[in-house]
Image (cartoon, rainbow, N blue to C red):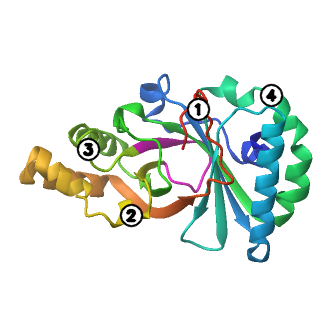
Amino acid sequence: MHKLLLICSLILCCCAVSPVWADDHEDESYILLINHYNVDPEHINDFMAGGEAWKKCYLENGGTESWTIWRRMQGEGVTFTFTKAFSNWQHFFAGEEAVNKCQSVVSEQIMPYVLSMNGGFARNIPEWTSQDAGSGLIVDVHNFRVKDYGLFDTTVEAVQAATKDDGHGANSWYYTIGGRDDAELFVVEYYADPAAMDAKTPGVWERLEEAVGEERSKQLQNDFINSVDEMWSYLYAQLPDLSHAPENSGTAQE
């Protein structure tokens, strides 16, 4: 589905990367494609039926790639988000016969119900990402626009070094590739299911204090706040019937 759905995304996005993280993280990280679709509220079921029809067509024609469809739980309108990981740009631009055979499903059964779309790319930051991150039926995405890149970089590096593999709060960090008016960086927190959201688990600052002590924890909290210009978050619920995650797909699943 990604090739036809993403033509508008390619127009919207440029290939410039955030100045601080590009050289440090690019060699080891994967590319995450993110498309947001604002859907006509009167045609939610039609849009979802189109997604199921495309998935069926793709698999029947031998498609093997993985992707995830999410429904955003807050914000204006009804938003569905398509995410797909690519190992590199060659992988992204490589053609796939199953996609070509299903283009009519996209144009006839999906796009007529889309009011607007916003597409973009991000790169994973492996050294900030938890070892056990990468899956969950619900995700909480925290977005950041940065005013002091150096302070943000060193602060997050210190926080993640102390907490990322302590057994709590699995997460993945990304920086945005090009575009405008979006977050420059974001972190994804994973929840296996709604029960995991209700569980009483320590937050990142509690975990940090446990790891480095109260004084150092407060210093890092203040540094983080001072490095950020704006922050916001959204919850997303995965739609398994519209998603596809074959075993050994070769790329990370988001």
Query: Residue at left 84%, top 44%?
Result: 57
In this figure, which residue is indicated by the disc labeled 2? Answer: 195
Q: Relative to 27, is 67 above or below?
A: below
Few, some or many residues within 10 Å of mark 4 (<14, 14–19, 20+)? few
The reply to whether callout 2 and callout 3 are in contact (CB within 8 Å) is no
Lower sequence index among marks 2 and 3: 3
Tag in front: 4 or 3 = 3
Place of residue 163 in the rendered image (x, y in percent of width and height, measured from the top left): 24, 43
Lower sequence index among marks 2 and 1: 2
C-alpha gap between disc 4 and disc 1 = 21 Å
C-alpha gap between disc 2 and disc 3 = 17 Å
Q: Nearer the viewer, residue 236 or 242?
A: 242
Tell me the quadrant of the picture where the C terminus can be found: top right
Secondary structure found at label 1: loop
Specify whether residue 158 is painted magenta. no
In this figure, which residue is indicated by the disc labeled 4? Answer: 95
Tag in front: 1 or 3 = 1
Tell me the amino acid under the disc marked 4. Answer: Gly
**Residue bounds of the magenta highlight:** 172-184
C-alpha gap between disc 1 and disc 3 = 25 Å
Specify whether residue 175 is painted magenta. yes
In this figure, which residue is indicated by the disc labeled 1? Answer: 247
Lower sequence index among marks 2 and 4: 4
Q: Which mark identifies residue 167?
A: 3
Q: Can residue 4 be seen by looking at this rendering? A: no
